Amino acid sequence: MELKMDIAALESFVAEQFPQVAGDFTVDALDESQVTVRLNVQDRHLRPGGTVSGPSMFALADLGMYFAVLSRLGPVALAVTANCSIDFMRKPAAGVDMLCVTRLLKLGRVLAVGDALLYSEGLAPPVARASLTYAIPPK
Amino acid sequence: MELKMDIAALESFVAEQFPQVAGDFTVDALDESQVTVRLNVQDRHLRPGGTVSGPSMFALADLGMYFAVLSRLGPVALAVTANCSIDFMRKPAAGVDMLCVTRLLKLGRVLAVGDALLYSEGLAPPVARASLTYAIPPK
Amino acid sequence: MELKMDIAALESFVAEQFPQVAGDFTVDALDESQVTVRLNVQDRHLRPGGTVSGPSMFALADLGMYFAVLSRLGPVALAVTANCSIDFMRKPAAGVDMLCVTRLLKLGRVLAVGDALLYSEGLAPPVARASLTYAIPPK
Amino acid sequence: MELKMDIAALESFVAEQFPQVAGDFTVDALDESQVTVRLNVQDRHLRPGGTVSGPSMFALADLGMYFAVLSRLGPVALAVTANCSIDFMRKPAAGVDMLCVTRLLKLGRVLAVGDALLYSEGLAPPVARASLTYAIPPK
């Protein structure tokens, strides 16, 4: 599927829409098959012991899917999360960022579906997996 | 199932374990069938437009299930989230707290399963629903 | 939400649409808050040991949601399953039917969301829980 | 992860355990990263119009994960499905088999997690995606 936004366009669009969290996330890579989003881990994302919290991983997976949808629909989109199913499989590593690799599996008229794997940077086994459905409002 | 912790015990246990978020949540009600947890909504939980963000609702559902499990297992537990499937059904109301009503459906030897409905305070239709599985470590 | 079909109308509509499975399922109860569907357990629904199979429970949960949606939309509907998240919590009892109690949580313009508890008849603890999203085609 | 069973061993193990359904499924491919299972589509798997039913796709995804777990644990396993979240994204094609490609993301002491893509044979876009958690009984 053709991309309608590049990394710079995605980041500036989200910086306008969600100024509270925009600094937390960076797009590391984007192509027609997948998008990689980085959580720039800070103290507010951590649980005691220094591992990234579940809600922070959810936020990362959610934003990864938002970027995947936006990059195909363009900046006019007001897509909203309808469902997320997330499995937490391993404890995140302490002291490193997290990366989320999202692939868009369907971009329909009213629903978009994708899935994601979340990693602690530098470690091969995924920390979490998620699948997400976004509802796309009528034009 | 008999309760091993009351509201005061749950809140002080979480205040010790998760000092970063303890102020955000209050237990409104607890009995043998369900627990009601309040998200004391603050600016950091909001999206532009004043509605509660998805990750904040995820955090509320996750903590509701944690309280449901803890209240039966007692404060020694180190249960961790294994899965959450959450459906966002309606836009939260602006300017009000959110309430999460969680019921525990299974408390097994290694897995606990529950589900939750999330409401904007004062409004009848649920904003979101979630089901959660916690893994319970061996003693 | 007002009901547009009663039990007899639901059963005859499904008998026409899905003749292969219609005999497997009966509507035990229907009101404005929930619908109860029975799986008339037969050999083809069983695993060795005599317990109901996972796919048969999935089919029961799926049909329960279909009835919940149909009963509000009327027989013109062509709603299709978009997502199902199902947790298998306990082993079903051998030699009894299964009952599925479904409540509709949202009936929107394009999406309907509901959840369900599945029981072995006569036993209190639920065997499984499921949440389902149906996509509703435009008129 | 090393494989403890090959295709022939998997198929004969399932033929013994689940004689009712064994003829419906074939293992097309198996390596250390994924397993491909075929649903040999027959009339009983179809909905009116000739497309594969949701419960048949659920059964395929469930068996794919079972094979993925078994192939690593060996034939002594009694793993059971704990959770499945499945998204139906496109209508299956009529008149062709379905293929399910499953990868195992985690094989822990008590839980295994994997995900799957389901295809109508010969068509590139996936018909459905699923994630599954299996509970592994103690030895």
Image (cartoon, coloured by chain):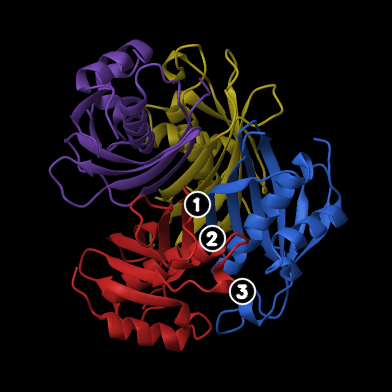
Chain colours: A yellow, B purple, C red, D blue
Q: Which mark is residue C51?
A: 2
What secondary structure is found at the residue carrying circle 3? loop
Q: Position of residue C42 (x, y in %)?
A: 52, 74
Q: Amino acid at mark 1?
A: Lys
Question: Is label 3 or label 1 in front?
Answer: 1
Q: Position of residue B65 (x, y in %)?
A: 35, 33
Which residue is located at x 68 percent, y 51 percent? Answer: D66
Would you name the residue on which mark 1 appears?
Answer: C91
Q: Is disc 2 surrounded by few (<14), some (14 to 19) or many (20+) residues within 10 Å?
A: some
Is the Cβ of the residue at disc 3 closer than 8 Å to that at disc 1? no
Q: CA distance from mark 2 to mark 1?
A: 7 Å
Along the line of sight, which residue is nearer the eye, D72 or A89?
D72
Is the Cβ of the residue at disc 2 closer than 8 Å to that at disc 1? yes
> In which image quadrant can residue D101 be found?
bottom right
Which residue is located at x 52 percent, y 17 percent? Answer: A51
What secondary structure is found at the residue carrying circle 2? loop
Would you name the residue on which mark 3 appears?
Answer: D52
Q: Residue furthest left?
A: B122
Q: Is residue A69 above or below residue B80?
A: below
Is the Cβ of the residue at disc 3 closer than 8 Å to that at disc 2? no
What secondary structure is found at the residue carrying circle 1? loop
Q: Amino acid at mark 2?
A: Thr
Q: CA distance from mark 3 to mark 2?
A: 24 Å
Chain of the residue on which disc 3 is drawn = D
Q: CA distance from mark 3 to mark 1?
A: 27 Å
